[in-house]
Image (spheres, coloured by chain):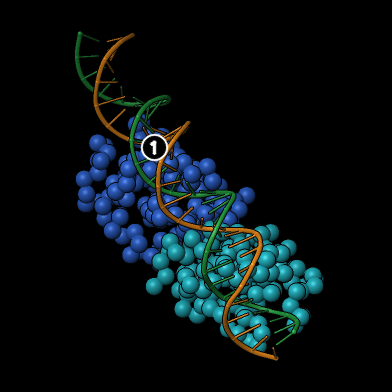
Chain colours: A blue, B cyan, C green, D orange
Amino acid sequence: MLCPLTFYKCLSEDTRLKILLLIATRGELCVCDLTTALQLSQPKVSRHLAELRKCGLLSDQRKGKWVYYQFNPDLPDWAVDVLQNTAKNNSQYIDSLLSMLDTQQDTCTRS
Amino acid sequence: MLCPLTFYKCLSEDTRLKILLLIATRGELCVCDLTTALQLSQPKVSRHLAELRKCGLLSDQRKGKWVYYQFNPDLPDWAVDVLQNTAKNNSQYIDSLLSMLDTQQDTCTRS
DNA sequence: TTCATATATATGATATTTCATATGTGTTTA
DNA sequence: TAAACACATATGAAATATCATATATATGAA
């Protein structure tokens, strides 16, 4: 059972909120996608991802060298609704980040 | 324009989240209703109310000696949705507080 | 004067960042 | 094929920043 306070603490920090809204939009992203989109150091991004994992908002899946993050399948519907509602109604907060994924050189050798 | 990060910072603290969910359920409440429901000191409740007012989530209305708080009419629809969705799907988080309002002696002389 | 509410200031508690380093996977090469 | 290497990601620990609480006191209405 996800406590609403735990959930909202996760959304109350700029990096974590952006990670969640990016994943709400794209379905899944790997760590290097996120460091590129957010222009932040890898340890900083990984640390916040660990927090989101620990609290049950995200789950991870390794594919070779890369680790992809997506919403935890156990996340309750109301929480998914909140995240998707927020992403849809605050595009100015994430659009420039999304465009980094498409137009900028991704640090992943993969891309 | 309400920034989503500002909004979620307001929801990331136990007292503030409970205040917002109580108001989502009841429409409006005065400070003494909230101190009763939450069993917290008046300065603590007032301080959090001031924060929610400053950030644009709540507006206040004085009625005689009492000050009533309700959602700010300028609060965007997505934010109202988030709060009502959360209240509806987390009744275990607020039901016991709501029952204090109905059954316990309210500290307001009014009641 | 009393009751309801607001706020200042000091203090304590938590969360975040950074740097260094560890782990884990795939790839090269001797 | 095993050692060495390169790349992606995770984490420990210290330094720093941010936030919440308590107590005392101020304001404002009846």
Quick one: SS at disc 1?
Answer: strand
- Residue B27 can be seen in this image: yes
Residue D29: give x, y in percent of width and height: 64, 89
Question: Looking at this view, is D21 or B87 the one in front?
Answer: D21
Quick check: A97 left or right of A9? left
| Residue underneath mark 1 | A67
Residue B61: give x, y in percent of width and height: 58, 83
Residue A47: give x, y in percent of width and height: 43, 41
Quick check: A59 left or right of B65? left
Question: Looking at this view, is B6 or A77 the one in front?
Answer: B6
**Residue depicted at x 39% and y 73%:** B1
Mark 1 chain: A
- Residue B81 can be seen in this image: no
Residue B22: give x, y in percent of width and height: 64, 69
Quick check: A12 left or right of B38? left
**Residue depicted at x 25% and y 41%:** A107
Quadrant for the C terminus of chain B, please.
Answer: bottom right
